[in-house]
Image (cartoon, rainbow, N blue to C red):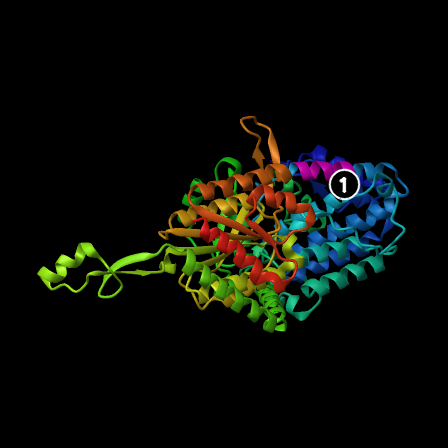
Amino acid sequence: MEIAEFEEKRADNLIWNAAGDYSLAPDFHAYDDEGRAQLYWNSLIGAACRHYEWDKLRAFYETFRKTRNREWYENLFWIALECSVFELEAADRPVFPWLRREYAGEELVKLSRDEVYEEAALYRTRELLRAHMEHVLAEDAAQTGRARQDAGKAPKEPSSGSIFSRISPRDRELLLQIESIHAQTTDEWIAELSRILTEYFGYGTEADALPEEKHIGGFLSKLPFLSGLGGGKNAQSEQETEPVRALAFGWGEHLYEYTPEDPAAYHKSVNFMGGRRPKGMGLQDYIAHHFGTPLYTAAEVRSMEQEYCTQNHKGCHLYFTRGDYTKEMLRDTFAGTSRNEALRQRRQNAEDYEKHADRYQVQIAQLTDRLRNSILMHLEEERFVSRTGVLAGNRMWRGLLLSDDRVFIRTVPGDTGNLTVDLLLDASTSQESRRKTVSAQGYMIAESLTRCGIPVRVLSFCSMSGYTIMTRYRDYGEIHDNDRIFRYSTAGANRDGLAIRLCRGLLEKNSAEHRLLIAVSDCKPYDMIKIQAGRSMHLLDYDEEAAVSDVAAQVHACRMENIAVMCVFTGEDSELPAARRIYGRSFVRIRDMGQFADAVSALITAQIESM
């Protein structure tokens, strides 16, 4: 792929037209993935030259060259500039809001899960841009036609099914701050963005600076490609950067970075797809650094995807983890940051539990007692020959002829080993406000079952960019690992149907006679990967009716395999119809934790009775 001379001139003209100054010598061009000059972004560059002092902006931009977080800073610079310049330009040029909406609509349609970037920083800033464009389309047409007068007011957060809701809480806060920059002067804009970059990444600190030996003549000749917050897999490794490189909105040509040795047509043969890895590679690496090391080998996961990612879940991918990190991963600042965030949430979950420990311990004790009684009453009894018990007439001859005193039948309650329970926690972003409660509920159920001697496995699930991530906190034999449930955290969306399908597959390999699956969910499934509408080629969003129908079908499939399924419902009143559609009468809603033992024991008992 090449940048044609025509596209270079077109980029210049777009910039000149927006700037209203044909004496400018543009030093930056924006292109799409096919090497075409981008209408909106080049116009935005020209508008930036008109409203701000471009020399100061470029000098500020060049400071990123000597930092470990260069890719983050460069991409956030352009997102922030787009927000601020639009507000200044929209009032003067009515066409600008239209250009913005057209670009936002085209960009959101064009982007797909197959666009996976090698660097996590680039992938995540692309997601931030998508979320920002989503905000653009959500604004009222009249509001988008003028600059906001309520400066400093953050955009309203979209629904749980939005792109914005599926990025991490930290990234959401970052985007809202970026969108809230309302600076009239260049110095104010630079100061505000510098403050945000310092707060989130340590911009301008000694820890963010690259060693001086990496610079030649005051300019950086090689930079580490970052794989996340704070640096790449090896913060000391270097990789050459080129004047034309991938950015969140496409490709940027940094004309001022060409050296005298560069041929005039250096960028003519740029490989526009060179910044991407094959499908899944870059994103999988990002997921590993975010959620922890994989639990299964790549071959094992491929086999599971072939078995489970079919029909409504065709095209989806799987990732299994225990939430652990290797020492090598922790050298990566992004993985370290993810682990620190997980530890922070774990600490919050555990502290909240301890705050109400007296109350929770009472509920655990009550639930344990009621479950024991239910098991004694309803699990199948075992009968075996004994020296005591009820006399068996058909065995008396053995006593007379063989001196065998085992002529009695003894009856004992069924072994709890004949019953296993899988606990599945919805870990999507929609559960964030209930995170502490869900972790406490999960812990109390697991602890009660453990005290009853019932094998329990605890997992959580969420989905991100086509991957369903299953985190296993404890397995059946790990009776001392219930505390790991406090590691529960939320992220992304939730493909409930695939998660339940996976649990069914795992339980089918379980030799226990009785199997129970308990989902802790708000019954609000949503995922970005669409599903096919029957035999037609029409695709439906995995949301609302289509998603609820899929989850209900998966629950029914479990029951057809003699797997009892129930739900601890955590959603709002509006989701109650979905809960009834999916689980029938086998769900319970706990409004007061003082009712926890009564509600959960009654539901589990009902499931045991029906086995």
Q: Is residue 357 visible?
A: yes
Q: What predominant SS class does the magenta segment belong to? A: helix
Camera-side residue of 543 and 446: 446
Residue 131 x, y percent position in the rendering: 70, 47
The percent coordinates of residue 601 (x first, y second) are: 52, 59
Q: Under tag 1, what secondary structure?
A: helix
Q: Closest to the observer: 107 or 550?
A: 550
* Residue farthest top in this picture: 536
Q: Quadrant of the N terminus?
A: top right
Going by the image, does 515 lie left or right of 579?
A: left
In the picture as drawn, the residue positioned furthest to the left comes out as 401
Residue 217 visible at all: no
Q: Give the quarter of the image for residue 542.
A: top right
Task: Give me the residue at 71% from left, 42% from top.
Answer: 30
Say which residue appears at 46% left-offset and 44% top-offset. 558
Out of 220 and 363, give the one closest to the viewer.
363
All told, the count of numbered labels is 1
Give the x, y percent position of residue 596: 59, 61
Q: Amino acid at mark 1?
A: Leu
Q: Residue 43, percent across and down?
A: 80, 41
| Residue named by callout 1 | 137
Crowd tier of the residue under label 1, counting other residues whose Cα lies within 10 Å: few below 14, some 14–19, many 20 or above: some
Report if residue 138 lies within the magenta region.
Answer: no
At x 84% / y 42%, what residue is drawn?
144
Q: Which residues are magenta?
A: 101-109
Q: Nearer the viewer, residue 394 or 493?
A: 394
* In the displayed structure image, the side of residue 478 where residue 129 appears, left or right: right
- Say if 552 sits above or below 376 in the image: above
- Residue 414 falls left or right of residue 599: left
